[in-house]
Amino acid sequence: SGLVMSSVAMLLAATTLAGQQSSARPTLLQVASLVAPERVKVGERFTLTLQLTPAGKMHVYAPTVVNYKPIALTVRPQPGLIIRRLSYPPAEKYFYAPLKEMVDVYQKPFEVKQELALDASPAGRAALKGVSMLTVQGTLRYQACDDNVCYPPRTVPLTWTVGIKES
């Protein structure tokens, strides 16, 4: 119902790299997302939840890492939308043997939550006037690695729609 597999992630998995006709780009991180509640009034909060599942033996870097590309969700600002708290779960410690170092990663399925609100200020109300659905756009950036190799960083475009109830 509220859970929608990101068609972009499916598309990425099916896209082949130029010059390599046979092997498709592997899915490194499955991305599913949901909006709750699906309909809100001006002034109310809602949450975007990303349900992320690294492929087997893969890890992605937590926001706390240095010298690596951490996972990052960015929501595009727009009139009528207030971007609130973004929360990541606690990271797992991972020993990266080739460099003999401990790094913060996610290896198991995890959730990233972005709190948003419909702007009740006069400018926000003006931006939302007569609007029944608000489309929220964002990007998820991450770098996935296995025990031996780090894949090039990826950027996944994401779109959510929230219904606006009469206040």
Image (cartoon, rainbow, N blue to C red):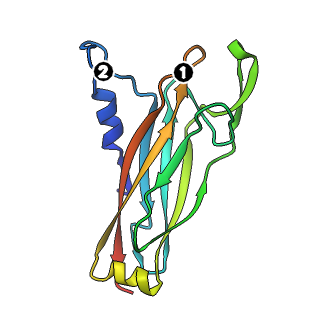
Helix, strand or loop at label 1? It is: loop
Q: Position of residue 104 (x, y in %)?
A: 69, 34
Quadrant of the image containing the C terminus:
bottom left
Q: Which three-letter amino acid code belongs to the residue tagged 1? A: Cys
Q: Which mark is residue 150?
A: 1
Q: Residues within 10 Å of mark 1 (few under 14, many from 20)?
A: few
Between the C-alphas of marks 2 and 1, the distance is 17 Å
The front one of 163 and 121 is 121
Quadrant of the image containing the N terminus:
bottom left
Which of the marked residues, 2 or 1, is nearer the chain's N terminus? 2
Q: Is any part of residue 165 visible from this angle?
A: no
Q: Is residue 160 left or right of residue 71?
A: left
Q: Is residue 163 above or below residue 88?
A: below
Q: Position of residue 33 (x, y in %)?
A: 43, 50
Q: Is residue 86 left or right of residue 128?
A: right
Q: Is residue 24 above or below residue 49?
A: above
Q: Which three-letter amino acid code belongs to the residue tagged 2? A: Leu
- The residue sitting at 50% across, 66% down in the picture is 116
Residue beneath disc 2: 17
Image-quadrant location for residue 94: top right
Q: Is residue 17 left or right of residue 81?
A: left
Helix, strand or loop at label 2? It is: loop
Q: Is residue 128 left or right of residue 52?
A: left
Q: Which mark is residue 2?
A: none
